[in-house]
Image (tube, helix red, strand yellow):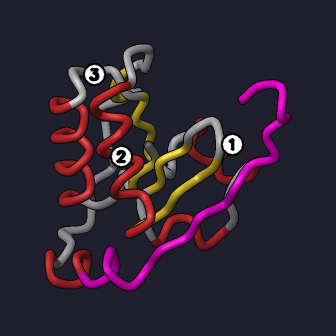
Amino acid sequence: MLYDDTCKMCHRFALVVDALSGSNLTIIGHYTPEGKRIRKQILDDTATDMFWVITKIGAYGGRAAIIPLIQSILTTKDGLGMKHDDAKCSNECNILLRSYSLVTHSRHIPFEVPRDSI
């Protein structure tokens, strides 16, 4: 999962997801070196508008990521947990604006999956 590691509310959300998954998901901040690399390779500049769940078959952002996130929390067993806990939480986010953002932003980027790997 990728999340906004400059937002206190988003960081708290990531901590809750980490706890619910038993640290079995890999959770990375958008602005960490790993997050920047992932955004450059898979996503784009607008990716920081929402949180993302990346699976073997695609990347899901915002509203589209809710069900893949729940599935990942329940089934993933090989993640690394939160990659860092030194988030640069400088912004106190407005919960109404972040909730509105979640409802209005939604993206799915499917990956090319070879038929023999399904």
Position in image of residue 26 (x %, y %): 43, 29
Which residue is drawn at the image coordinates 24% and 32% (left, top)? 18
Q: Residues within 10 Å of mark 1 (few under 14, many from 20)?
A: few
Q: Please state which of the two labelled residues, at mark 3 or mark 1, is closer to the viewer.
A: 3
Q: Nearer the viewer, residue 61 or 92?
A: 61
Q: Amino acid at mark 3?
A: Ser
Q: Earlier in the sequence, mark 1 or mark 2?
A: 1
Q: Residues within 10 Å of mark 3 (few under 14, many from 20)?
A: many
Badge number at residue 2:
none
Q: Nearer the viewer, residue 65 or 97?
A: 65
Q: Secondary structure at mark 3?
A: loop
Which residue is drawn at the image coordinates 44% and 65% (left, top)? 64
- The image quarter in which residue 55 lies: top right
Q: Amino acid at mark 2?
A: Leu
Q: Amino acid at mark 1?
A: Arg
Position in image of residue 22 (x %, y %): 21, 21
Q: Is residue 4 above or below residue 25?
A: below
CA distance separating discs 3 and 1: 22 Å
Residue that label 3 marks: 23
Residue that label 1 marks: 37
The span shown in magenta is 100-118
Which residue is drawn at the image coordinates 51% and 50% (left, top)? 31
CA distance separating discs 3 and 2: 13 Å
